[in-house]
Amino acid sequence: MRRIIHRFCGESRGATAIEYAMIVAMIALAASVAIQAFADGTVGMWEFVRNEALTKL
């Protein structure tokens, strides 16, 4: 029993995998937010161009 507890406490592969998964999730979230912000800006720019073109016609 003591050996099992010692092995369990000394195991770090699971913790490392969870840490990497959390890092990947944070990067994915940041990328999603950045893409959404960029998309909103691009849509706004093209709406402005369209409105300007329509008023000049």
Image: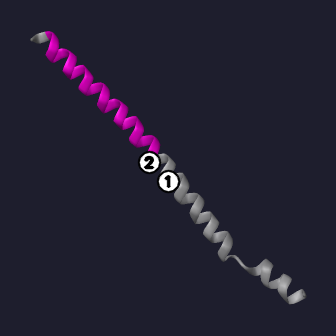
In the rendered image, which quarter contains the C terminus?
A: top left
How many other residues sit within 10 Å of disc 2, few (<14), some (14-19) or many (≥20)?
Answer: few
Q: What amino acid does circle 1 point to?
A: Ile
The image position of residue 43, as x and y in percent, is 30, 29
- Which range is magenta? 32-55
Q: How far apart are marks 1 and 2 (CA)?
A: 6 Å
Residue 52 appears at what percent x and percent y? 18, 15
Q: Which residue is drawn at 80% across and 78% down?
A: 9
Left or right relative to 40: residue 24: right
**Marker count (numbered):** 2
Say which residue appears at 37% left-offset and 31% top-offset: 40
Q: Mark 2 points at which residue?
A: 31
**Residue under circle 1?**
27
**Residue 13 location in percent, x, y?**
65, 76
Q: In which quarter of the image is the N terminus?
A: bottom right
Three-letter amino acid code of the residue under disc 2: Ala
Q: Is the magenta stretch mostly helix, strand or loop?
A: helix
**Is 23 above or below relative to 5?**
above
Query: 33 above or below 5?
Result: above
Q: Is residue 5 left or right of residue 46?
A: right
Q: Is residue 44 magenta?
A: yes
Residue 35, magenta (yes or no)? yes
Horizontal and vertical percent position of residue 39: 35, 36
- Horizontal relation, residue 5 to residue 11: left or right: right
Q: Residue at x 39, y 42 (%)?
A: 35
Q: Residues within 10 Å of mark 1 (few under 14, many from 20)?
A: few
Q: Residue at x 11, y 11 (%)?
A: 56
